[in-house]
Image: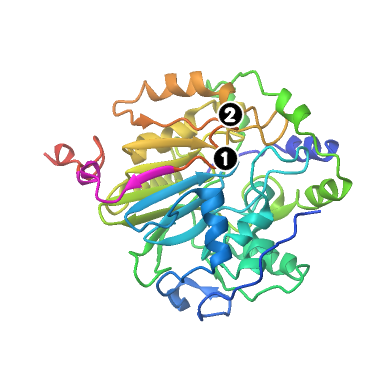
Amino acid sequence: MKQSKRAGWFVALLMMLGGCGESTLPAVDQPERARADGDIAHWQPLPLAPVPAPEVQALREQLLGADPTDPRAVKLWWVGVSSFIASMGGHLFLLDAWEPIGIQAGYVPITRAQLADLKPEAILIGHGHFDHAADAGEIAARSGAVLVGGDSVCAKARERAQQVENAQNFACVSLGNQNTPGAGSVQQIQLWSDMPPITVIQHLHSAADPGDLLAGGRPLLYVPEVLSYLQHLNTDPRVTLRFLGSLADDGGVGEPQGGTWAYHLRIGDFSLLWHDSAGALGEDNATAQRMRQAFADLPGCVDVQLGALVGFGLLTSGLRDPLAYVDVVRPHVTLPNHHDAWLPLLGGGAAAYEGQWRAALATLVYPPELDYLRDPQDYLRARVYAVDDPRWKIPPPGSRCDPAQNV
Protein backbone atom coordinates (compact mmCIF):
# COMPACT_ATOMS: atom_id res chain seq x y z
CA MET A 1 0.00 0.00 0.00
CA LYS A 2 1.29 3.42 -0.84
CA GLN A 3 2.55 5.12 2.31
CA SER A 4 0.83 8.48 2.80
CA LYS A 5 2.80 11.21 4.49
CA ARG A 6 0.73 12.62 7.29
CA ALA A 7 0.05 16.23 8.06
CA GLY A 8 2.48 16.46 10.97
CA TRP A 9 2.04 20.19 11.24
CA PHE A 10 -1.39 19.52 12.77
CA VAL A 11 0.10 18.74 16.18
CA ALA A 12 2.24 21.85 16.10
CA LEU A 13 -0.81 23.97 15.31
CA LEU A 14 -2.82 22.44 18.14
CA MET A 15 -0.03 22.89 20.66
CA MET A 16 0.20 26.56 19.79
CA LEU A 17 -3.51 27.01 20.54
CA GLY A 18 -4.12 26.97 24.06
CA GLY A 19 -13.61 21.49 34.43
CA CYS A 20 -15.54 19.43 32.80
CA GLY A 21 -19.24 19.45 33.71
CA GLU A 22 -20.35 17.15 36.52
CA SER A 23 -23.27 14.77 36.22
CA THR A 24 -26.32 15.90 38.14
CA LEU A 25 -28.37 12.69 37.87
CA PRO A 26 -27.92 9.65 40.11
CA ALA A 27 -26.12 6.65 38.69
CA VAL A 28 -28.44 3.99 37.29
CA ASP A 29 -26.88 0.62 36.46
CA GLN A 30 -27.52 -0.79 33.03
CA PRO A 31 -28.86 -4.37 32.77
CA GLU A 32 -26.47 -7.23 33.49
CA ARG A 33 -24.18 -8.03 30.58
CA ALA A 34 -20.69 -9.33 29.88
CA ARG A 35 -18.38 -6.97 31.76
CA ALA A 36 -14.94 -8.17 30.75
CA ASP A 37 -13.24 -6.53 27.81
CA GLY A 38 -13.05 -8.83 24.82
CA ASP A 39 -13.43 -9.18 21.10
CA ILE A 40 -16.60 -9.54 19.04
CA ALA A 41 -16.52 -13.34 19.17
CA HIS A 42 -16.95 -13.34 22.96
CA TRP A 43 -19.54 -10.59 23.22
CA GLN A 44 -22.91 -11.35 24.82
CA PRO A 45 -25.66 -9.23 23.16
CA LEU A 46 -27.48 -6.60 25.17
CA PRO A 47 -31.13 -7.30 26.01
CA LEU A 48 -34.18 -5.19 25.24
CA ALA A 49 -33.78 -1.48 25.90
CA PRO A 50 -34.10 -0.72 29.62
CA VAL A 51 -36.93 1.49 30.89
CA PRO A 52 -35.22 4.79 31.78
CA ALA A 53 -35.60 6.29 35.23
CA PRO A 54 -38.07 9.21 35.31
CA GLU A 55 -35.32 11.83 35.59
CA VAL A 56 -33.46 10.28 32.65
CA GLN A 57 -36.60 10.27 30.51
CA ALA A 58 -37.27 13.88 31.47
CA LEU A 59 -33.78 14.93 30.39
CA ARG A 60 -34.09 12.99 27.13
CA GLU A 61 -37.33 14.77 26.30
CA GLN A 62 -35.91 18.13 27.35
CA LEU A 63 -32.87 17.82 25.07
CA LEU A 64 -34.15 15.55 22.29
CA GLY A 65 -37.90 16.14 22.14
CA ALA A 66 -40.92 13.95 22.71
CA ASP A 67 -40.62 10.16 22.52
CA PRO A 68 -36.92 10.15 21.56
CA THR A 69 -36.69 6.34 21.47
CA ASP A 70 -39.85 5.65 19.46
CA PRO A 71 -39.08 2.22 17.92
CA ARG A 72 -41.04 3.13 14.80
CA ALA A 73 -38.41 5.67 13.79
CA VAL A 74 -34.65 6.09 13.52
CA LYS A 75 -33.63 9.43 15.00
CA LEU A 76 -30.32 11.28 14.82
CA TRP A 77 -29.10 14.37 16.66
CA TRP A 78 -25.81 15.97 15.63
CA VAL A 79 -23.69 17.13 18.57
CA GLY A 80 -20.57 18.38 16.82
CA VAL A 81 -17.76 17.07 14.56
CA SER A 82 -18.85 13.48 13.77
CA SER A 83 -20.63 12.81 17.06
CA PHE A 84 -24.32 11.92 17.05
CA ILE A 85 -26.93 10.80 19.53
CA ALA A 86 -28.87 8.03 17.82
CA SER A 87 -32.07 6.11 18.48
CA MET A 88 -32.91 2.90 16.64
CA GLY A 89 -35.21 0.04 17.56
CA GLY A 90 -35.96 1.74 20.88
CA HIS A 91 -32.26 1.85 21.84
CA LEU A 92 -30.42 5.12 22.58
CA PHE A 93 -26.70 5.18 21.81
CA LEU A 94 -23.85 7.48 20.76
CA LEU A 95 -21.74 7.64 17.62
CA ASP A 96 -18.36 9.03 18.80
CA ALA A 97 -18.01 10.84 22.10
CA TRP A 98 -16.43 14.28 22.35
CA GLU A 99 -17.80 17.60 23.50
CA PRO A 100 -16.17 20.19 21.19
CA ILE A 101 -14.51 22.23 23.88
CA GLY A 102 -10.99 23.52 24.49
CA ILE A 103 -10.36 26.48 22.22
CA GLN A 104 -14.03 27.39 22.48
CA ALA A 105 -16.81 26.55 24.93
CA GLY A 106 -20.58 26.41 24.69
CA TYR A 107 -20.77 26.37 20.89
CA VAL A 108 -22.50 22.99 20.89
CA PRO A 109 -25.58 23.14 23.20
CA ILE A 110 -24.89 19.94 25.15
CA THR A 111 -22.13 18.94 27.56
CA ARG A 112 -20.34 15.65 28.13
CA ALA A 113 -22.09 15.42 31.50
CA GLN A 114 -25.48 15.68 29.80
CA LEU A 115 -24.48 13.07 27.22
CA ALA A 116 -23.73 10.72 30.09
CA ASP A 117 -26.95 11.64 31.89
CA LEU A 118 -28.94 10.57 28.84
CA LYS A 119 -27.83 7.04 29.81
CA PRO A 120 -26.87 5.76 26.35
CA GLU A 121 -26.72 1.99 26.11
CA ALA A 122 -23.66 1.96 23.87
CA ILE A 123 -20.97 4.22 22.40
CA LEU A 124 -19.65 3.34 18.93
CA ILE A 125 -16.25 4.92 18.19
CA GLY A 126 -15.05 5.43 14.62
CA HIS A 127 -11.45 6.06 15.69
CA GLY A 128 -9.64 7.25 18.77
CA HIS A 129 -8.34 10.71 17.95
CA PHE A 130 -9.30 13.30 20.56
CA ASP A 131 -12.04 14.95 18.50
CA HIS A 132 -13.89 11.64 18.32
CA ALA A 133 -13.23 9.74 21.54
CA ALA A 134 -11.68 11.98 24.22
CA ASP A 135 -14.86 11.81 26.34
CA ALA A 136 -15.65 8.13 25.75
CA GLY A 137 -14.16 6.95 29.05
CA GLU A 138 -15.94 9.55 31.17
CA ILE A 139 -19.31 9.07 29.48
CA ALA A 140 -19.08 5.28 29.71
CA ALA A 141 -18.04 5.46 33.35
CA ARG A 142 -20.93 7.77 34.24
CA SER A 143 -23.56 5.89 32.25
CA GLY A 144 -22.42 2.26 32.15
CA ALA A 145 -22.65 2.32 28.34
CA VAL A 146 -20.92 -0.43 26.39
CA LEU A 147 -17.98 0.96 24.41
CA VAL A 148 -17.16 -0.39 20.94
CA GLY A 149 -13.89 0.58 19.27
CA GLY A 150 -10.25 -0.28 18.70
CA ASP A 151 -7.85 -1.68 21.29
CA SER A 152 -6.32 1.70 22.11
CA VAL A 153 -9.75 3.30 22.51
CA CYS A 154 -10.65 0.74 25.14
CA ALA A 155 -7.34 1.26 26.94
CA LYS A 156 -7.59 5.05 26.98
CA ALA A 157 -11.23 4.91 28.12
CA ARG A 158 -10.25 2.65 31.05
CA GLU A 159 -7.48 5.09 31.97
CA ARG A 160 -9.77 8.11 31.95
CA ALA A 161 -12.56 6.26 33.75
CA GLN A 162 -10.28 5.95 36.78
CA GLN A 163 -10.56 9.71 37.22
CA VAL A 164 -14.38 9.62 37.43
CA GLU A 165 -15.90 9.65 40.90
CA ASN A 166 -18.37 6.80 41.54
CA ALA A 167 -17.58 5.35 38.13
CA GLN A 168 -19.75 2.52 36.90
CA ASN A 169 -18.28 -0.59 35.40
CA PHE A 170 -18.61 -0.83 31.63
CA ALA A 171 -17.74 -3.32 28.94
CA CYS A 172 -15.51 -2.53 25.98
CA VAL A 173 -15.76 -4.59 22.82
CA SER A 174 -12.52 -4.46 20.85
CA LEU A 175 -12.63 -4.42 17.06
CA GLY A 176 -8.86 -4.70 16.58
CA ASN A 177 -6.08 -2.24 15.86
CA GLN A 178 -4.41 -0.35 13.03
CA ASN A 179 -3.14 -3.54 11.38
CA THR A 180 -5.62 -6.17 12.53
CA PRO A 181 -7.78 -7.39 10.90
CA GLY A 182 -6.78 -4.82 8.25
CA ALA A 183 -8.28 -2.20 5.95
CA GLY A 184 -11.09 -3.63 3.85
CA SER A 185 -11.98 -6.30 6.41
CA VAL A 186 -15.60 -6.85 7.46
CA GLN A 187 -16.83 -7.93 10.89
CA GLN A 188 -20.28 -8.29 12.40
CA ILE A 189 -21.29 -7.67 16.00
CA GLN A 190 -24.60 -8.67 17.55
CA LEU A 191 -24.69 -5.67 19.87
CA TRP A 192 -28.36 -6.06 20.80
CA SER A 193 -30.33 -9.28 21.01
CA ASP A 194 -33.40 -7.73 19.33
CA MET A 195 -31.60 -5.96 16.46
CA PRO A 196 -29.83 -7.19 13.32
CA PRO A 197 -26.05 -7.46 13.67
CA ILE A 198 -23.98 -4.35 12.97
CA THR A 199 -21.57 -4.64 10.06
CA VAL A 200 -18.20 -3.02 10.80
CA ILE A 201 -15.75 -2.19 8.02
CA GLN A 202 -12.15 -1.28 8.77
CA HIS A 203 -11.08 1.52 6.46
CA LEU A 204 -8.43 4.25 6.51
CA HIS A 205 -8.17 7.63 8.15
CA SER A 206 -7.86 10.74 5.99
CA ALA A 207 -4.31 11.62 5.00
CA ALA A 208 -2.41 14.41 3.29
CA ASP A 209 -0.21 12.77 0.66
CA PRO A 210 2.16 15.09 -1.25
CA GLY A 211 2.18 12.49 -4.01
CA ASP A 212 -1.39 13.47 -4.80
CA LEU A 213 -0.22 16.98 -5.67
CA LEU A 214 2.36 15.57 -8.05
CA ALA A 215 -0.38 13.48 -9.65
CA GLY A 216 -2.54 16.53 -10.30
CA GLY A 217 -4.43 16.81 -7.03
CA ARG A 218 -5.32 20.22 -5.68
CA PRO A 219 -5.94 21.47 -2.15
CA LEU A 220 -9.43 22.65 -1.32
CA LEU A 221 -9.48 26.41 -0.91
CA TYR A 222 -12.08 27.93 1.40
CA VAL A 223 -12.69 30.87 3.72
CA PRO A 224 -12.86 29.49 7.29
CA GLU A 225 -15.23 30.61 10.00
CA VAL A 226 -13.51 32.84 12.57
CA LEU A 227 -16.19 34.82 14.41
CA SER A 228 -17.71 31.81 16.20
CA TYR A 229 -14.42 31.11 17.98
CA LEU A 230 -14.24 34.66 19.28
CA GLN A 231 -17.88 34.58 20.37
CA HIS A 232 -17.46 31.29 22.24
CA LEU A 233 -13.85 31.59 23.38
CA ASN A 234 -12.94 29.28 26.25
CA THR A 235 -11.41 31.13 29.20
CA ASP A 236 -11.21 28.26 31.71
CA PRO A 237 -7.58 27.07 32.08
CA ARG A 238 -8.75 23.68 33.44
CA VAL A 239 -10.65 23.04 30.21
CA THR A 240 -7.63 24.12 28.17
CA LEU A 241 -5.35 21.73 30.07
CA ARG A 242 -7.78 18.87 29.60
CA PHE A 243 -7.96 19.65 25.89
CA LEU A 244 -4.17 19.78 25.51
CA GLY A 245 -3.87 16.50 27.41
CA SER A 246 -6.01 14.74 24.82
CA LEU A 247 -4.20 15.87 21.66
CA ALA A 248 -1.96 12.80 21.48
CA ASP A 249 -4.85 10.32 21.79
CA ASP A 250 -4.50 7.31 19.49
CA GLY A 251 -1.26 8.58 17.98
CA GLY A 252 -2.32 12.21 17.62
CA VAL A 253 -2.32 12.40 13.81
CA GLY A 254 -2.02 9.89 10.99
CA GLU A 255 -3.57 6.45 11.01
CA PRO A 256 -5.01 5.82 14.50
CA GLN A 257 -3.31 3.07 16.49
CA GLY A 258 -6.69 1.56 17.24
CA GLY A 259 -7.83 1.51 13.61
CA THR A 260 -10.57 3.38 11.73
CA TRP A 261 -14.05 1.83 11.61
CA ALA A 262 -17.30 2.39 9.73
CA TYR A 263 -20.60 1.07 11.14
CA HIS A 264 -23.62 -0.13 9.14
CA LEU A 265 -26.83 -0.50 11.18
CA ARG A 266 -30.15 -1.90 9.97
CA ILE A 267 -33.73 -2.18 11.15
CA GLY A 268 -36.59 -3.32 8.94
CA ASP A 269 -35.94 -2.00 5.43
CA PHE A 270 -33.89 0.93 6.73
CA SER A 271 -30.10 1.04 6.82
CA LEU A 272 -27.65 3.62 8.16
CA LEU A 273 -23.91 3.96 7.46
CA TRP A 274 -21.72 6.14 9.68
CA HIS A 275 -18.02 6.81 9.19
CA ASP A 276 -16.11 9.57 10.96
CA SER A 277 -13.18 9.81 8.55
CA ALA A 278 -12.66 9.50 4.79
CA GLY A 279 -9.45 7.78 3.75
CA ALA A 280 -7.93 7.26 0.33
CA LEU A 281 -10.85 5.26 -1.04
CA GLY A 282 -10.37 6.82 -4.45
CA GLU A 283 -6.79 5.64 -4.95
CA ASP A 284 -5.85 2.89 -7.39
CA ASN A 285 -4.32 0.19 -5.19
CA ALA A 286 -5.29 -3.15 -3.66
CA THR A 287 -6.21 -1.73 -0.25
CA ALA A 288 -8.54 0.89 -1.72
CA GLN A 289 -10.10 -1.76 -3.94
CA ARG A 290 -10.80 -4.00 -0.91
CA MET A 291 -12.39 -1.11 0.93
CA ARG A 292 -14.54 -0.13 -2.04
CA GLN A 293 -15.74 -3.72 -2.39
CA ALA A 294 -16.58 -3.94 1.31
CA PHE A 295 -18.70 -0.78 1.18
CA ALA A 296 -20.39 -1.76 -2.07
CA ASP A 297 -21.36 -5.16 -0.65
CA LEU A 298 -23.03 -3.93 2.55
CA PRO A 299 -26.17 -5.99 3.26
CA GLY A 300 -29.28 -4.11 2.23
CA CYS A 301 -27.08 -1.33 0.81
CA VAL A 302 -27.33 2.15 2.42
CA ASP A 303 -30.34 4.41 2.80
CA VAL A 304 -28.77 7.18 4.91
CA GLN A 305 -25.06 7.93 5.05
CA LEU A 306 -23.43 10.02 7.77
CA GLY A 307 -19.99 10.70 6.33
CA ALA A 308 -17.01 12.83 7.32
CA LEU A 309 -16.39 15.66 4.87
CA VAL A 310 -13.30 17.39 6.25
CA GLY A 311 -9.99 15.58 6.68
CA PHE A 312 -6.30 15.92 5.96
CA GLY A 313 -6.89 14.84 2.37
CA LEU A 314 -8.40 18.25 1.61
CA LEU A 315 -4.83 19.59 1.64
CA THR A 316 -3.63 17.48 -1.29
CA SER A 317 -6.61 15.93 -3.07
CA GLY A 318 -9.52 18.25 -2.33
CA LEU A 319 -12.88 16.49 -2.04
CA ARG A 320 -11.74 13.33 -3.86
CA ASP A 321 -11.92 10.98 -0.88
CA PRO A 322 -15.24 11.97 0.74
CA LEU A 323 -16.79 12.01 -2.73
CA ALA A 324 -15.46 8.50 -3.38
CA TYR A 325 -17.31 7.21 -0.28
CA VAL A 326 -20.60 8.63 -1.53
CA ASP A 327 -20.01 7.24 -5.02
CA VAL A 328 -19.23 3.74 -3.76
CA VAL A 329 -22.01 3.64 -1.15
CA ARG A 330 -24.66 5.30 -3.37
CA PRO A 331 -27.16 6.09 -0.59
CA HIS A 332 -30.61 7.58 -0.84
CA VAL A 333 -29.58 10.46 1.47
CA THR A 334 -26.18 11.74 2.57
CA LEU A 335 -25.46 14.02 5.55
CA PRO A 336 -21.90 15.41 5.66
CA ASN A 337 -20.32 16.13 9.02
CA HIS A 338 -16.92 16.81 10.59
CA HIS A 339 -17.11 20.14 8.76
CA ASP A 340 -18.24 22.47 11.55
CA ALA A 341 -16.24 25.13 13.39
CA TRP A 342 -14.60 22.90 15.98
CA LEU A 343 -10.97 24.03 15.63
CA PRO A 344 -9.58 27.22 14.05
CA LEU A 345 -8.53 26.86 10.40
CA LEU A 346 -9.03 23.09 10.32
CA GLY A 347 -12.67 23.39 11.30
CA GLY A 348 -13.77 25.89 8.69
CA GLY A 349 -17.48 25.76 9.53
CA ALA A 350 -20.13 24.12 7.35
CA ALA A 351 -20.79 27.24 5.29
CA ALA A 352 -17.17 27.25 4.09
CA TYR A 353 -17.56 24.00 2.15
CA GLU A 354 -21.20 23.87 1.09
CA GLY A 355 -20.96 25.29 -2.42
CA GLN A 356 -18.00 23.13 -3.43
CA TRP A 357 -19.55 20.00 -1.91
CA ARG A 358 -22.83 20.52 -3.76
CA ALA A 359 -20.90 20.98 -7.00
CA ALA A 360 -18.87 17.83 -6.35
CA LEU A 361 -21.98 15.71 -5.72
CA ALA A 362 -23.49 17.00 -8.97
CA THR A 363 -20.65 15.33 -10.89
CA LEU A 364 -21.73 11.85 -9.78
CA VAL A 365 -23.71 9.58 -12.08
CA TYR A 366 -26.00 8.76 -9.15
CA PRO A 367 -26.04 11.83 -6.89
CA PRO A 368 -27.97 11.26 -3.63
CA GLU A 369 -30.29 13.63 -1.85
CA LEU A 370 -28.16 16.02 0.20
CA ASP A 371 -29.20 16.99 3.72
CA TYR A 372 -26.45 19.49 4.46
CA LEU A 373 -25.87 19.92 8.20
CA ARG A 374 -25.00 23.48 9.18
CA ASP A 375 -23.48 24.66 12.43
CA PRO A 376 -24.65 25.76 14.86
CA GLN A 377 -28.31 25.69 13.83
CA ASP A 378 -28.43 21.95 13.16
CA TYR A 379 -26.91 20.91 16.49
CA LEU A 380 -29.49 18.81 18.37
CA ARG A 381 -31.98 19.25 15.54
CA ALA A 382 -33.54 15.83 15.06
CA ARG A 383 -33.38 13.95 11.79
CA VAL A 384 -36.24 11.45 11.84
CA TYR A 385 -36.67 8.50 9.47
CA ALA A 386 -39.79 6.35 9.72
CA VAL A 387 -38.76 2.70 9.61
CA ASP A 388 -41.81 1.74 7.53
CA ASP A 389 -41.36 4.55 4.98
CA PRO A 390 -41.96 2.92 1.54
CA ARG A 391 -38.91 4.76 0.26
CA TRP A 392 -36.59 2.31 2.00
CA LYS A 393 -38.09 -0.59 0.05
CA ILE A 394 -36.74 0.95 -3.15
CA PRO A 395 -33.03 0.20 -3.69
CA PRO A 396 -30.85 3.32 -3.95
CA PRO A 397 -30.25 4.06 -7.65
CA GLY A 398 -26.96 2.65 -8.89
CA SER A 399 -26.33 0.58 -5.77
CA ARG A 400 -25.64 -3.16 -5.80
CA CYS A 401 -29.23 -3.62 -4.59
CA ASP A 402 -30.61 -1.85 -7.67
CA PRO A 403 -31.97 -4.50 -10.08
CA ALA A 404 -30.92 -2.30 -13.00
CA GLN A 405 -27.29 -2.97 -12.06
CA ASN A 406 -27.73 -6.73 -12.45
CA VAL A 407 -29.10 -6.91 -15.98
Vertical order, 151 against 106 (above or below): below
Q: Is residue 283 visible?
A: no
Q: Which mark is residue 311?
A: none
Q: Residue furthest left?
A: 407
Q: Which residues are magenta?
A: 383-393
Looking at the rendered structure, the kind of residue marked 2 is Leu
Find residue 178 and report its image quarter. bottom right
> Left or right: 207 with respect to 278?
right
Q: How is the image coloured?
A: rainbow
Disc 2 designates what residue?
314
198 to the left or right of 381: left
Location of residue 68 in the rendering, given as x and y in whole percent from the top left corner: 45, 54
Q: Residue at x 58, y 64 (%)?
A: 55
Q: Quadrant of residue 316?
A: top right
Q: Residue visible at 66% across and 70% down?
A: 26
Residue wearing tag 1: 206
Q: What separation in Å lies between label 2 and label 1 (alpha carbons)? A: 9 Å
Residue 94 rendering spot, x and y as whole percentages: 53, 56
When asked about the image quadrant of residue 343, the answer is: top right
Q: Residue at x 70, y 62 (%)?
A: 24
Question: Are circles 2 and 1 on residues that touch, CB within 8 Å?
Answer: yes
Callout 1, which amino acid? Ser
Which residue is at 83% across, 40% downward? 15
Q: Position of residue 236 (x, y in %)?
A: 86, 44
Q: Is residue 387 magenta?
A: yes
Left/right placement of residue 113 relative to residue 357 reads right
Element type where label 2 sits in the image: helix
Q: Earlier in the sequence, mark 2 or mark 1?
A: 1
